[in-house]
Image: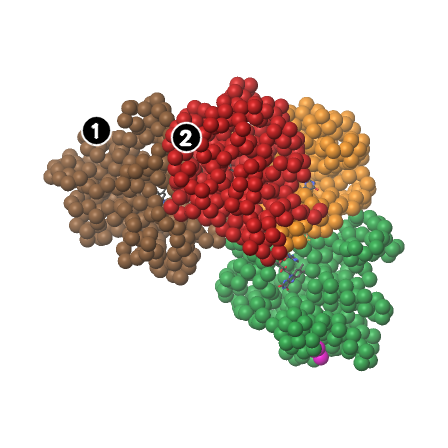
Chain colours: A brown, B green, C orange, D red
Amino acid sequence: MNLRDVTVIEHVEVQGGYRLLVMDAPDIAAQVQPGQFIHLQIPDLRDALLRRPFSIYNAENNRLSVLYKGVGVGTRWMADLKPGDPLSVMGPLGHGFPIAEAGGYPVLVAGGYGMAALYIAARESRQKGTAFFGGASAGDILCVPEFEALGWEVRVTTEDGSLGMKGIVTDAMDEWLAQNRPEGEPEYFVCGPSGMLKAVGERAMKAGTKAWISLDNNMCCGVGACLTCVQKIRTADGAWEWQRACREGPVFECREVIWDGEESVEHRTSNIEHRTKS
Amino acid sequence: MNLRDVTVIEHVEVQGGYRLLVMDAPDIAAQVQPGQFIHLQIPDLRDALLRRPFSIYNAENNRLSVLYKGVGVGTRWMADLKPGDPLSVMGPLGHGFPIAEAGGYPVLVAGGYGMAALYIAARESRQKGTAFFGGASAGDILCVPEFEALGWEVRVTTEDGSLGMKGIVTDAMDEWLAQNRPEGEPEYFVCGPSGMLKAVGERAMKAGTKAWISLDNNMCCGVGACLTCVQKIRTADGAWEWQRACREGPVFECREVIWDGEESVEHRTSNIEHRTKS
Amino acid sequence: MSDVSVNIGGIRMKTPVMVASGTFGYGPEYADLVDLSGLGAIVVKGICVEPTLGNMTPRTAETRSGMLNAIGLPNPGFEGFVEKHMPFLRQYDVPVIVNVWGRTLEEYADIAEKFDSVDGVAGLEVNVSCPNIKEGSGLFGTDLNMFRQAIAGMRERTRLPLIPKLAPNVSDIKSFARTAEDCGADAISLINSYPAMAIDINTRRPKLANVTGGLSGPAIHPIAVKLVWEASSAVNIPVIGMGGIMTWEDAVEFIIAGATAVAVGTANFVNPLTAIEVAGGIREFLDRNGMASVSELTGTLET
Amino acid sequence: MSDVSVNIGGIRMKTPVMVASGTFGYGPEYADLVDLSGLGAIVVKGICVEPTLGNMTPRTAETRSGMLNAIGLPNPGFEGFVEKHMPFLRQYDVPVIVNVWGRTLEEYADIAEKFDSVDGVAGLEVNVSCPNIKEGSGLFGTDLNMFRQAIAGMRERTRLPLIPKLAPNVSDIKSFARTAEDCGADAISLINSYPAMAIDINTRRPKLANVTGGLSGPAIHPIAVKLVWEASSAVNIPVIGMGGIMTWEDAVEFIIAGATAVAVGTANFVNPLTAIEVAGGIREFLDRNGMASVSELTGTLET
Ligand SMILES: Cc1cc2nc3c(=O)[nH]c(=O)nc-3n(C[C@H](O)[C@H](O)[C@H](O)COP(=O)(O)OP(=O)(O)OC[C@H]3O[C@@H](n4cnc5c(N)ncnc54)[C@H](O)[C@@H]3O)c2cc1C
Ligand SMILES: Cc1cc2nc3c(=O)[nH]c(=O)nc-3n(C[C@H](O)[C@H](O)[C@H](O)COP(=O)(O)OP(=O)(O)OC[C@H]3O[C@@H](n4cnc5c(N)ncnc54)[C@H](O)[C@@H]3O)c2cc1C
Ligand SMILES: Cc1cc2nc3c(=O)[nH]c(=O)nc-3n(C[C@H](O)[C@H](O)[C@H](O)COP(=O)(O)O)c2cc1C
Ligand SMILES: Cc1cc2nc3c(=O)[nH]c(=O)nc-3n(C[C@H](O)[C@H](O)[C@H](O)COP(=O)(O)O)c2cc1C
Ligand code: FES
Ligand code: FES
C-alpha cells in the first residue's frame, strides 16, 4: 500500500455517464491484485473532505485506471479532471478476489462499476467462463468487448430491454443455469449492488457452490483505522464478528456475510483482527 | 445594484502578480460611478464561503474589469478562471469619488490596486492633474501609460528605487508640493493602504484642502446588512458614529474618518443611517 | 401545488423560510435584489432599549465552511429603530419579527413592553446569547434560571408572539425548550451562532476585536439539526430551525427533524436570494413527494 | 533548529503532534505509510474492560468541512487489546496513550487499574463522552459531578499519567478543566467530536444508524480553539488541543491559544501524513520566528 501524488493521463466519457480515468502511478499499479481498490483524494473539492474509493479497473504499464459514474458531489467534480492534473491516490487497498479454482467454471456477475471491478480478475483467471452483466439500460453495460476479447462469454440483461435480455441479471443466470451444464462447478465472482450480491449468494449457497462477493460498504479511511465499513461476518463457531470491508474485504465468500436484517446470530467478539487473507 | 451571473471574457497576468479580469456584465457596467466596487463570488471555492470585494477598474462597452493580486485563498484560486467561466457579481456597490471641484487641481495618490480603483475617476475628471503612484517595486506600479493617455502627469515612487523615485509616495508628493504651485487648490483622491490614506489625509488637513480616501476595510455582505466594515465617522456636532465602508463608503473625506487609536471622541449614536451621498 | 404557508404562534407566513437576525440588516439593504414580500418573515438585527455601539473592528472573519461574527449588537435603540426603520418595513406585505435583547432582566421586560404597541411588528424573537451585565458572569442563554426569568418577565409585558432564540452551547437543549414553553413562549428558534474564535498566527492576536465570536454557516448545520430535533421533541410549540442553511436540502433536514419554519442567515451574504430559492426548493420537494402542505413533512424523521 | 519536544504530564514526546483516538486505529493500519516513531504519541481507539460491539452501520457520514461518526466504541476489551495490539505498538519508539472509557464509575476505575501494570503504556486518555448506563440519562462528560467521580476514582487506581478528554457541549468548559486538575489529572485534552446529526431527506432517516453522532473536522476548529483557550486559562496542567487540524497553521492556533500539544484526527483520513507534516510546519514556524522551543509559543495569545 502506498500514498502517491499521481498525474491524470487520460480522462474520457465512456458511455451512459461513465468515465474512464487513467493515472500514471507506477508503484501502485505494480502491486495490484484482482478486486482491490484505490482511495482517491479529489483535489480542491469544496467542502467535502473525505477520499472516495474506486475499484481498480486496470493496472498495466505503470498505469492505473478506474471507471466511475457521477453520482454525488465528488464524482461530479471529478468530471473536470484533465490530463496533467494531480491526484492523491492511496492503494492498492483491500483483499480482492481469489484465483478461480482449477477445474471449476468461473461465472462473473456484475452491475454498474462491478464490470470494471471484475476486469483484472477476468484477465488473471486461467479458465474463462460466462459473464452476466446487468443494468437498467444499454448505457449501463460496460466493457463487453474487453471481456469478450479475454475469451469470456458475455450475457447482458437490461431492465428496459434496450440491450440483451430484458430483466435482471439473476433472471439471465437462472435461465442459463437451467439450460446449461458447465464443465466444472460454477464459482461466482460478483460485484454490484447489495441486492445482486445477496441474490447470487443465495443461489450459490443453495447449489453448494462458492460466490465471492465484493461489498459496496460506505468507507471513510479505507485502511482499517476508522471502523466505518464494517460488515457482520460469520465466525467458524457460528457466531459473528465485525470485519472491515476496506481491509479484510471488500471481497468475502457469500457464506461469511451476514446481511442486515438476517435473523440474529450471537456476536462473538468485536475484535477486528488483522487477518492475512492474501 | 444588481446581482448577476456573468461570464469571464479575458483574464491575463498584467505584471508583478497582478491580473486583469474582464467580465461581460452589461447592466452592472452601465451603472458604475468612479470609486465603486463589485462583490464577487468565486465559484467552487473549497470551504471559503464569502464574496470578495474588488474595485472596479473599468466599465465600458458592457464590460466590467478589475485588477487584482493573489494574496489569499480566494484571489489565488481566481488565477484559474478562464474565458467562458461563470462568476456571480453583485454591484456596483458603495459611494465612490465625487467629481473633482471646478477650478481645483486634482491629485491622485495610489498604492497597489488603488491605481485601478482611481482609473474611472481619472477619466471622468474634467481637469487632469498629477498622479502619484507608489509601491514596493517596479512590478507594483500599474497602469501608468493608461493614466498618461488620459492626460495625467504620473510620478512614480518605489521603495526599492526600481522605478521612479526611491522612497514612499508621500515623499514624492511633499517634494513636488514644495517645488510646484499648481493652478488651483489641490484636491486629493486617494486609494491604497491605510497608512497612505492617513498620511495624505494629514497633509490635506494641514493645508486646508480636501482629500477623498477610499477605505480598505474588511467586508462581508458588501451591502450594509452585516455591519462588518464599519468605520468611525465624525458627525457634524463633533461626536462620531459608525458608518459602513460598503454603503456610505468606501470613499470618505479625510476629515470625516476617525482612525483606530485616535484620541477618543464621544460616540454620538450607533445609528447607521441610510445616507444618500450620491 | 403544495401549500408552503405556515403559522408560527399566530404569525402567518407565506413560506416557511425567514431571514435570520443580523444577516439581513433592517430590510432596505437587500431590497434592490430580493422581493421582500416573498420572504416568510424578516427578522431584523437585534434591538435593545437604548442606542448601542457594538464592538470594535474587525467584527467578522471567515472560517472553513463558516464565519465568525462579533458585531456586538450595535443598534439605534428602540426609538431610533421604530422611527427610522419601521416606516420602510411597513411598506411590504411580510411579517416583521423584531429580534430583541437586554443587558438586564428589566431591559428584556422593558423592550417587550415597548414593542407591544408598535404598529407593523408581527412578533419578537428574543436573543438570549448575551451576557447579563448586572448579575455578572452568567449568560441569559446558558443559565436556565436566568433564561426563565427573562422570558417570563417579557411574557407579562407583551401580547406579541414571543420567540425565545436558544443558545446552542448548552448540554441539555430540551430543558431550555421546555422552559420557554412553560413561560408562555409562542415558538422557539434555534440555533444562534456558536461561541468560537480564530487566531491570526502571525500577529498572535484574535481575528476578532472582541476576541471570541459566534460561528455560523454550513459548518454548524449538523449541530443545529441535532439541537432542533431534540428541542422539537420536547415541546408542542412550533420550532424555527436555523444554522448553516445554504440549500433547500439543508432546510428540509430541519423540517424533517421537527422545524415548522426555518431561517437563512450566513447564506444571505453569499447569495441574497437564498431564502427565496430555498422556499421554491421546498415547494418542489413537497410536490414531488405528493405532500399537500409542509406540515406533512414536519417532524417525520424515522429513527 | 527549534526544539519541538514536549512533556505532557511526564510523557515525553518528540513532537507536539499526536494522532487522535479513533482516527488511527491501533497503529498497524497506517504503519505502511507513516513512520510511527515520528509521531508525538499514538492515542489508540477507546478501550473498555469487556469486548464491545459498537453501533450498527452506517457509522460515518460526510458533512461540509467535517464528518459525523457514531462508531460506538467497538473494541476487543482490555485483554484483547493488550494481547493483540500492544506487542505491535511496543516495537516503536513512540509513546502509546490508551484512550479508555466505561459504562459506569466502576468500569472507569477498573480500566485505569488494569492498565497500570501494562508494559509500554505511557498514559491514559479518558473519554467521558459516553452515557452512564447505570445512572441513566446523565453523561460523564457533561455532568460535572459525574465527571469528578469518574476522574477521582481513576486517580486512586492508577499511577499512569491521566488525561481526561473534555466533551465540548458544555456551557462552562473551565469548571470541567479545573475539576480535572483538582482530581489529580496530569493533563487534559479537548475537544471530542461535537454531538450532531444529518438526515437523508429522501429516506427521511438519519444518515447514521445511531441517529446522532459526533461532528469532527475543520468545521469545528474555531469552536475547539475557543474551548482550548478558555480551558488552558483555567488550569496549570498541560492542555492537548484538537478539533479540525488540517494544516500546521491550525495547530499553531491551538498552541497560541494555550495548548502544549495537539492531536490530529479526521485529517488522517484525508492525508495520513498530516501529523508528521504539521510537526514539520510548527518547527519551521518556530525557526522563522526565532523561538528556541515550542514552549515559547504556548499561550502567547495577545488579547
Ligand atoms: C470498494 C469500493 C469500490 C468502489 N468502486 C467504484 C468504481 O469503480 N466506480 C464507481 O463509479 N464507484 C465506485 N464505488 C462507489 C464510489 O466510491 C462512490 O460512488 C463515490 O464515493 C461517491 O462519491 P460522491 O462524492 O460522488 O458521492 P456522495 O455525494 O458522497 O454520495 C452520493 C451517494 O453515494 C453514496 N456513497 C457515498 N460514498 C459511498 C461509498 N464509499 N460507498 C458506497 N456508497 C457511497 C452516498 O450515500 C450517496 O447516496 C466504490 C465503492 C466502494 C466502497
Ligand atoms: C472596497 C474594496 C475594494 C478592493 N479592491 C481590490 C482590488 O481592486 N484589487 C485587489 O487586488 N484587491 C482589492 N481589495 C482587497 C480584496 O478584497 C482582498 O485582497 C481579497 O478579499 C482577498 O481575498 P483572498 O481570499 O485572496 O484573501 P483571504 O485569504 O481572505 O485574506 C488574505 C488577506 O487579506 C485580508 N483580507 C481579506 N479580505 C479582505 C477585505 N475584504 N479587505 C481587506 N483585506 C482583506 C485578510 O485579512 C488576509 O490578511 C479590495 C477590498 C475592498 C474592501
Ligand atoms: C453577522 C451576523 C450577525 C448576527 N446578528 C444577530 C443578532 O443581532 N441577533 C441574533 O439573535 N442573532 C444574530 N446572528 C445569528 C443568526 O441570526 C443565526 O442564528 C446564526 O447565524 C445561524 O444561522 P446561519 O448559520 O444560517 O447564519 C447573527 C449572525 C451573523 C452571521
Ligand atoms: C471516526 C472517529 C472515531 C473516533 N473515536 C474516538 C474514540 O474512540 N475515543 C475518543 O475519545 N475520541 C474519538 N474520536 C474523537 C477524536 O479523537 C477527536 O477528538 C475529534 O475527532 C476531533 O478532532 P478532529 O476534528 O481532528 O477529528 C473519534 C473521531 C472520529 C472521527
Ligand atoms: S473505511 Fe475505515 S475501517 Fe474501513
Ligand atoms: S460589509 Fe456588511 S455592512 Fe459593510
- Pointer 2: residues within 10 angstroms few (<14), some, or many (20+)? many
Element at label 2: helix
Membership of B154 in magenta stretch = yes
- Most extreme residue toward the right is B237
Q: Which residues are magenta?
A: B152-156
Instruction: Reply yes or no: does residue A12 show up in magenta.
Output: no
Q: Nearer the viewer, residue C171 or D209?
A: C171
Q: Can residue C113 be seen here?
A: no
Residue at image location 59% in from the left, 61% down from the top: B71
Task: Residue type at mark 1: give it.
Answer: Lys
In front: B63, or D103? D103
Residue beneath disc 2: D81
Residue under label 1: A206
Residue B78 in the image: above or below residue C43: below
Looking at the image, do the residues carrying marks 1 and 2 touch, with CB atoms under 8 Å apart? no
Against D171, is A150 above or below? below
Above-or-below relation of A130 to B24? above
Which chain's residue wears label 2?
D
The quarter of the displayed image where residue A223 is located: top left
Identify the residue at image location x=68%, y=31%: C142
Label 1 secondary element = helix
The amino acid marked with disc number 2 is Phe
